[in-house]
Image (cartoon, grey):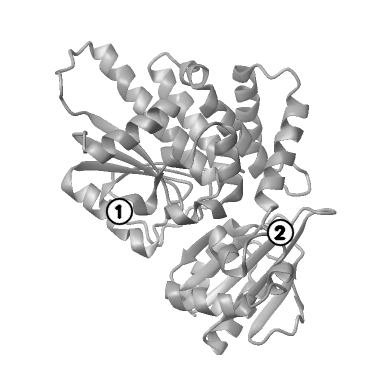
């Protein structure tokens, strides 16, 4: 992967390419999104080189080639907010300088000035700022419930969408399937151990090591983790999983140095005009930070949103989740709070609790299996008839 990343940055800077494959994760840029983009971009580059080798073409000196680029969908200056991503990649020897971030290049200019294809990983609904990418999307790999309300892609766009614990599970499966066609089902994983390790680590974190309490792990996630452990020849898989989970959870929840404004940007999805940050701490703790609601108000204004749905989670002393709704339009804020309380597909089991913050509706979430993926369909349904 290190060679792939360094070559990508060099060729992008020198414009040494004839065509582009951009692999783009979602705007939250959590570990699942970042690793999915990095590993799948690395695989597409490897696959391209294997196909060229099979065809036995003679490279023309100086000729430009297809360039596969993994894009982390976050601005470079905000990378440190992604504490578990920064930790995991640094531990793997991948420095910030080796990565391509959202604001390093004008993506609209990149896709229009040369032949370009776009692969979306860990999302299939484009943010408003990314709508221009839709005509270029050729493949989608995502693990959240399918949403066809804004499906504006080409008819031949290939999609792998399955509700599993981690998008990395589907990325690994796709790599296995495409490699099997070349009669090299395991070769990429064997020759790219860093990619294999990153996939393994991410699935363990996303499923919380198949916690029965969290209930995010699926048989497909377990099947892929077991396969990856076989490739890595891990002697004591359970001990390795527990060790990885502890280190990654510590990195993700270590947000003591982040201000309320930074936390609002750490892991966020924007659904039309609803700002949906997810915290590695409880919302109750976030709201206790100095100027927390002022930060929410300023963030809504700068992002062009009218509502904020704050989602919190803590794994200290057992899993806990909570949520809060606040916004610049009191009536609309109250309606969303009521809508989410009444939502039944599935029921979020929100219990109102008074934290005495103005224009803020705060809830303890009793259904611990519901993460942001379960809230997004409810938000979309609300926005269709606010």
Residue 332 in percent (x, y) is at: 54, 84
Of 183 and 13, which appears nearest the observer? 13
The image quarter in which residue 237 lies:
top right
Q: Identify residue for label 2.
A: 313
The image quarter in which residue 141 lies:
top left
Q: Identify residue for label 1.
A: 134
Residue 377 in percent (x, y) is at: 53, 63
Residue 93 in percent (x, y) is at: 53, 31
Of 29 and 159, which appears nearest the observer? 29
Residue at 49% x, 43% y is 34
The image quarter in which residue 317 lies:
bottom right
Is 274 rendered above or below residue 133?
A: below
Residue at 76% x, 34% y is 242
Residue 194 in percent (x, y) is at: 53, 26
Of 281 and 118, which appears nearest the observer? 281
Sequence-wise first label, 2 or 1:
1
Check the picture and name the quadrant holding the N terminus.
top left
Q: Is residue 68 visible?
A: no
Q: Can residue 225 be seen in this view?
A: yes
Which one is in front in this view, the residue at disc 2 or the one at disc 1? 2
Tell me the crowding category of disc 1: few under 14, some 14 to 19, or many 20 or more residues within 10 angstroms, Cα based.
Answer: some
Residue at 27% x, 34% y is 11
Is 271 rendered above or below residue 231?
A: below
- From the viewer's perspective, tell me whether residue 7 is left or right of residue 263: left
- Element marked by disc 1: helix
- From the viewer's perspective, tell me whether residue 226 is left or right of residue 69: right
Q: How far apart are marks 2 and 1 (CA)?
A: 33 Å
Tell me the crowding category of disc 2: few under 14, some 14 to 19, or many 20 or more residues within 10 angstroms, Cα based.
Answer: many
Residue at 67% x, 80% y is 361
* Circle number at residue 58: none
- Element marked by disc 2: strand
Is 126 rendered above or below residue 327?
A: above
């Amino acid at each position: 992967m290190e060679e792939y990343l360094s070559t990508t940055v060099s060729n992008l800077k020198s414009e040494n390419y004839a065509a582009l494959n951009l692999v783009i994760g979602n705007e939250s840029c959590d570990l699942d999104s970042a690793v999915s983009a990095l590993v799948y971009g690395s695989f597409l580059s490897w696959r391209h080189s294997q196909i060229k080798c099979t065809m036995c073409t003679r490279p023309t000196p100086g000729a430009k080639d297809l360039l596969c680029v993994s894009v982390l969908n976050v601005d470079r200056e905000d990378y440190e907010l992604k504490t578990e991503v920064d930790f995991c990649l640094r531990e793997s020897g991948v420095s910030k300088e080796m990565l391509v971030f959202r604001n390093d290049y004008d993506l609209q200019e990149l896709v229009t000035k040369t032949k370009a294809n776009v692969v979306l990983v860990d999302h299939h609904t484009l943010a408003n700022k990314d709508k221009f990418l839709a005509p270029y999307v050729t493949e989608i790999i995502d693990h959240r419930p399918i949403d066809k309300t804004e499906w504006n892609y080409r008819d031949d766009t290939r999609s792998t969408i399955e509700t599993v614990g981690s998008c990395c599970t589907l990325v690994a499966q796709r790599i296995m399937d495409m490699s099997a066609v070349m009669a090299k089902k395991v070769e990429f994983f064997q020759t790219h151990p860093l990619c294999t390790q990153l996939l393994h680590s991410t699935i363990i974190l996303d499923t919380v090591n198949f916690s029965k309490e969290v209930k995010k792990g699926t048989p497909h996630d377990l099947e892929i983790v077991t396969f990856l452990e076989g490739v890595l020849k891990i002697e004591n898989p359970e001990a390795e999983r527990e060790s990885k989970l502890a280190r990654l959870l510590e990195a993700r929840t270590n947000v003591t140095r982040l201000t309320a404004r930074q936390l609002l940007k750490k892991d966020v999805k924007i659904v039309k005009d609803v700002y949906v940050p997810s915290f590695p701490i409880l919302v109750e703790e976030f709201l206790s930070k100095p100027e927390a609601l002022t930060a929410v108000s300023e963030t809504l204004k700068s992002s062009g949103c009218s509502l904020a749905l704050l989602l919190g989670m803590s794994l200290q002393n057992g899993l806990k989740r909570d949520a809060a709704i606040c916004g610049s339009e009191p009536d609309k804020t109250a309606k969303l709070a009521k809508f989410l309380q009444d939502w039944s597909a599935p029921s979020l089991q929100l219990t109102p609790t008074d934290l005495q913050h103005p224009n803020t509706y705060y809830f303890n979430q009793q259904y611990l299996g519901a993460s942001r993926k379960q809230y997004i369909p409810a938000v979309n349904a609300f926005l269709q008839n606010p």
